[in-house]
Each structure stands twice: as C-alpha cells, then as structure tokens.
Amino acid sequence: MEEAPPSRQLVSWSDIPVELAGLVLGRLPAHVDRVRFAAVCPQWRVAARQGNLPPPMPMLLLPDATVYSLPGSEAFHFPACAGYTDACGTGNWLVFSGEDGCFLRDPFTNETVTVPALSRTRFQRVGDESDDAAGLSWMEMCKGKLPDAHKIVFCSPHLIAAIFNYSSVEITRIAVCQPGASSWWSVLGNGPMFVDIVFHQGKLYALGSEVTLFAVHISVDHSTGDPWVSQIQQVIGGLLSTQMIFLPDGLLILRVSYLVESHCAVLLVCREIDLRLKAGNWDSIEVLEAERSRFEVYEANFSQSHWTKVTTLGNDQVLFLCRRFCRSVNISHNEMPGDRIFFMDNDEGYYPGYSEEASSSCSVYSMRDSEVSTPLPMVSWKPGEVFATWLFP
C-alpha cells in the first residue's frame, strides 16, 4: 500500500528566520527585488540591517499608492499605502483620514497612531496675567475655519508637532499633541510665518519665512499630560528677505527653504526655482512648470547663532526633499552616487498656482557640478491634494 505524500504546510513571511532571510536576500539578482521583499516582510528589512548587505534603496510613493525604487525600477502597487491623504515628516508614517478622525500608519509595520481631527484645536494665550493661575486660557477653534496641516512630525511617543496653515487669514501656527489625544494645542497671537519644523536632539525647531530659526519650547500640563508651546525663541537670524522675484519675460523666481537633520546637525536647504508663468496672467498667477532649480545648503551653528554655508554633503550622503518630508540618508556608492539632493519638480506645497497643464516628477541635483538629472525619466504625476513622498524600507 502506497504511503500518502506528506502534506505541504504554508509558511508565513513572519515565520522565516532572520538568518535565512539574509541568506536568500543576498542571492537575489537585483536591488529592486530586495526592495519588493522589504516592502512586504519585516524579516527582510532586519536581515538587510544586520548583515553586510546594503539597505533597500529609498522609494518614491505616488498618490495612487504606486511605488518606484530608486535609482530606477518598474512600478509596483503597495496596498498598505492606498488611501493615504498626507505624509508625515518623520519615519515612514503616512496620514489617513477616516470618519472618526485622523491616524498615522507605518505601511511597513502597520503600526497605527491616532491624532486629533483638525477641527479639534485649542488655542493657548501665554503670559497674560488676567488669565487663569497657569497663565493660559484655552479657546476651541471655530470649525468653520479648518487649517491645513502643512507638516506633521512624529517627534516621540509623547509628542506630535505640526504646522497649521490658516490660508483664509494668511497665518501659520505651531500645534502639538500627544498620540491618541483628543485635541491639538496651539498658540494664540501674532507670530512669524513658519515654513518648516524639525525635531533635533530632543528639541523642536521651526523655520520662519525669512529663513530665521526658532527654538520651540514644549511644556507638559501635569494634570492632563498634554504638551503645549510655552515659548518660541529666535536662535539664528534670517538669510533672505524676498521669497518671490518677478521678471518681465513671464518668469517667477521662487525661493523655498527646508530643514533637514543630518549627522547630528540641522541643515538648511535653500532652493531657488524658475517658474514659467502662463502668458498674460499676471493678475491671477498660473504656473505652467518649474524650469530650473538651484540649491544652497547651510548648517545651523548654534554656538555662534548663524548659518554656515556647506559646499558638500559627503560622498555617502543624499538628501531627499519634499514639502511634507525631508531626510538625509547614508548611501552605498555601489548603489547610487552620493553628494546629491533628490526633489520633486512641481511640489504642490511650494505654490498653489500650478495650472492643470502642469505635472510633477522626481529630479536630482548634484552638489559637485550643480547639474540636474532625472532618475526616473518616464515617471510623472499631476500635483493635487494628495502629495507624493519618499519611503525608506
């Protein structure tokens, strides 16, 4: 009597030992395959970090959850990203909006953190003796004037910070909360226009529109555990006073600035963009495309309170920029040349006046020769309410 063949048992990705994952990963023929494995299984990512293999390359995520691995790969769909509404400024957190509010989720680990809805914002008035004993007064924000969360940063398990942009009155505010809280807390009163924030060595810093750096001091309400902004203090003076320059031949020069943490330093990246305007449309500006970009990089010198110009990032460093997300990454030269800056050509966060004819794509700027190239020449997308961003397996 013949014995029945042994039954095959399906093995989950998560059951694969890290050592075996590393062995298989090292034998894959191309880095794009390693990226695909890293996108679906945490064991592959751990194996890449623990072994001698280079980490998976960064990925470009488009609004429809299409993903491209750099420096070049065929597209594949990443279901865990489907439906995201915004990108967070740290880690791989993506923002999702639902009927019960907003939440952040890491598409690689599926870890999820809830955040308050934008309508749940309370303002604090600091230093007014007529207010309560704590020197604070809280006012619920009018739900008819919802802000845009210009940038969200997951600072720590106890602090999430954001820039709220109130376009109707052309002001910005720093807002903070703890994960899972029911309300954001923000400062009431006049203040600078903020364009970027970064969490560096346990401190929150904000960049003003005139490229002035501020330290944002966070205190905690001992009765509720809620964080709140107790002080905003200038630590480095500004570099530029003009953000837009109009030229007579239908060209607009726009200056945009970013904050990036890199090797225990805070970098300021200044981008100058030549925008081609639609003919005869000076009264209501409509931008056709971004024709050219130039970059300058500075390091924050906190001891002397000034910006120090940087001429090179280093052969093993690459910056990835977009209005919602910036990161400095160590790169193996075998995978990709260093000392470069990856950026989005037409990032909707830069300027709201892009025409329906405009499209965005990914470009890279070399710090060595100031040349701009296109790593994914066939990839483009329409700017819109959902932003393209970077992912790092």
Image: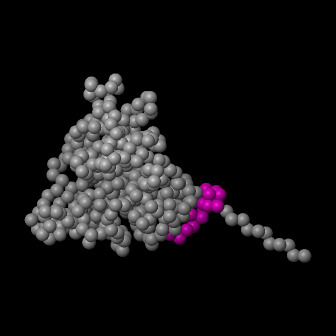
**For residue 301, which quarter of the picture?**
top left
Residue placed most toward the observer, 81 or 134: 134
Residue 270, image x, y percentages: 24, 53
- Rendered-image quadrant of the N terminus: bottom right
Residue range (magenta): 12-32
- From the viewer's perspective, tell me whether residue 331 is left or right of residue 208: right
What residue is shown at x 41% (from left), y 69% (from top)? 72
What residue is shown at x 62% (from left), y 57% (from top)? 14
Residue placed most toward the observer, 365 or 392: 392
Residue 389 can be seen, yes or no: yes
| Color theme of the render | one colour
Residue 58, image x, y percentages: 43, 60
Dominant secondary structure (helix, strand or loop) of the stretch shown in magenta: helix
- From the viewer's perspective, tell me whether residue 19 is left or right of residue 130: right
- From the viewer's perspective, tell me whether residue 315 is left or right of residue 181: left
Residue placed most toward the observer, 321 or 88: 88
Answer whether residue 247 is magenta in the image: no
Residue 83, image x, y percentages: 45, 61
Q: How many discs appear?
A: 0
Image vertical order of residue 23 relative to residue 214, above or below: below
What residue is shown at x 31% (from left), y 67% (from top)? 360
Residue placed furthest toward the right: 1
What residue is shown at x 34% (from left), y 34% (from top)? 138
Residue placed most toward the observer, 203 or 323: 323
Residue 356, image x, y percentages: 27, 70
Answer whether residue 31 is magenta in the image: yes
Residue placed furthest toward the left: 248
- From the viewer's perspective, tell me whether residue 30 is left or right of residue 13: left
Residue 291 can be seen, yes or no: no
